[in-house]
Image: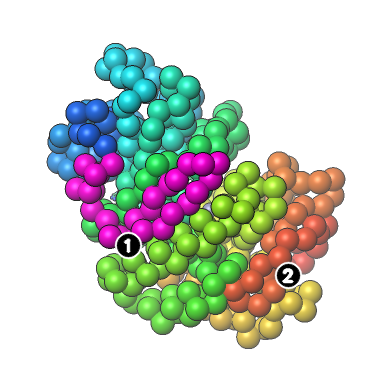
């Protein structure tokens, strides 16, 4: 199995871009591990969890809360687990965030790892050590920085994933390529059909590329004081669009990426040809590239961004395809490209 290592504060996270859930036995003893998963993943893949004790949670962002965490603590307590027990989150980004948070806080921290089952979790959410839950409508307000010991990407899970969910992951993969790997961007361009048909070799190359980018960045800036912010390309606007309603995360990020590309063009850092190329690639997966929702609501949400500084926001621009730079900009400038 090909692997990538992420070493932070003396801890090693081993990441396998193309593994099988069967390999879990190499990382934890079935009798001394607890799988946390959600109902949808359970429905399709529950038979794979057989030798393990399990905790099932409800799917959906509205369940990424302290109430769910409290329920998990209760079950861990009833199972009388101790610090030698490994917690394994098997699911999308929500399960990974929840399982990682529960594991990194219960008994002041248990060993944990992930088997990400959505493309978004495989290319992004499962790696980097951010774990957390929402509070009163604010995303990821409560959380920890704690690295999983292992991440096993099992591509067979993607066969049951709805295409709309796959698209969320594709938007993040394009984002990762844009910020630091031109060759990966071109590879995605050349393999659009193979991605949609879940070609294993192609997906493995893409997941490996994205996780290499993410581990490189996180190893230099675990706590997002600088370079890690590049991973937010398309997300300042994307989050605002998502909050205003009507778009899923990947769709909103897709529109946000195109807006960031246009702003980079206005600053002379990206050619018009490259902007069109980025737009065409996202559109070829059925991702939207222009905003159709309420302008006022989106600008209002940008204004409430928690990363805002006065009338300005820190914004990720592209300096060519495969290179990102972070600069502050006035919120008012956003309106010009968004509408
Ligand atoms: N920690 C991080 O660094 C990080 C990074 C990016 C995103 N996130 C978080 O990730 C979350 C989004 O993750 P997501 O897009 O994976 O969403 P998700 O976890 O909600 O999964 C999407 C849907 O697909 C279902 N599902 C998952 N795997 C499946 C499979 N193999 N077959 C069929 N159905 C399946 C889930 O039950 C859910 O309904 C957000 O809460 C976001 O904040 C965290
Ligand atoms: Zn995202």
Disc sitting over residue 263 in the figure? 2
Task: Give the magenta-colored segment's residue range.
Answer: 1-27
Picture coordinates of residue 218 (x, y %)? 57, 52
Please check the rendered image and state whether residue 20 is part of the magenta-colored stretch, yes or no.
yes
Which of 38/77 is in front? 77
Please check the rendered image and state whether residue 192 is part of the magenta-colored stretch, yes or no.
no
Q: Residue furthest front?
A: 10
* Residue 89 visible in rendering: yes
Vertical order, 126 against 172 (above or below): above
Q: Is disc 1 placed on a helix, strand or loop?
A: loop
According to the image, label 1 marks what residue? 2
Q: Residue at x 20, y 33 (%)?
A: 30
Q: Residue at x 81, y 46 (%)?
A: 309
Which of 6/130 is in front? 6
Q: Is disc 2 placed on a helix, strand or loop?
A: helix
- Of the residues under marks 2 and 1, which one precedes in the sequence? 1
The tally of labels here is: 2
Q: Quadrant of residue 258?
A: bottom right
Q: Is the C-beta of the residue carrying label 2 under 8 Å from the nearest atom of ligand 2?
A: no
Q: Residue furthest bottom?
A: 273
38 left or right, relative to 270:
left
């Amino acid at each position: 199995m090909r692997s990538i290592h992420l070493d932070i504060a003396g801890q090693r996270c081993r990441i396998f871009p193309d593994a099988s859930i069967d390999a879990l036995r190499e990382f934890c003893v079935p009798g001394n591990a607890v799988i946390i998963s959600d109902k949808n993943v359970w429905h399709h893949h529950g038979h794979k969890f057989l030798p393990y004790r399990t905790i099932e949670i409800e799917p959906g962002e509205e369940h990424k809360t302290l109430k769910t965490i409290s329920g998990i603590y209760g079950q861990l307590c009833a199972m009388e687990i101790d610090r030698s027990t490994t917690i394994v989150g098997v699911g999308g980004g929500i399960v990974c965030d929840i399982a990682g948070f529960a594991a990194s806080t219960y008994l002041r921290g248990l060993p944990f790892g992930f088997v990400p089952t959505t493309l978004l979790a495989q290319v992004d959410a499962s790696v980097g050590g951010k774990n957390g839950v929402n509070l009163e409508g604010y995303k990821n307000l409560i959380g920890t920085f704690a690295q999983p010991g292992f991440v096993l990407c099992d591509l067979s899970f993607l066969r049951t994933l709805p295409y709309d969910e796959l698209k969320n992951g594709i938007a993040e993969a394009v984002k990762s390529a844009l910020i630091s790997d031109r060759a990966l961007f071109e590879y995605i361009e050349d393999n659009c059909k193979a991605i949609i048909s879940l070609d294993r070799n192609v997906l493995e190359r893409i997941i490996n590329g994205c996780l290499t980018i993410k581990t490189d960045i996180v190893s230099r800036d675990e706590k997002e004081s600088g370079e890690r912010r590049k991973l937010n390309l398309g997300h300042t606007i994307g989050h605002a669009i998502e909050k205003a309603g009507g778009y899923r995360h990947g769709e909103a990020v897709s529109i946000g990426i195109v807006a960031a590309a246009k702003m980079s063009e206005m600053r002379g850092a990206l050619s018009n040809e490259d902007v069109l190329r980025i737009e065409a690639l996202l559109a070829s997966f059925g991702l939207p590239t222009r905003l159709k929702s309420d302008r006022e609501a989106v600008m209002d949400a940008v204004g409430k961004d928690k990363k805002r500084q006065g009338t300005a926001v820190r914004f990720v621009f592209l300096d060519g395809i495969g290179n990102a730079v972070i600069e502050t900009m006035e919120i008012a400038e956003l309106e010009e490209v968004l509408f």
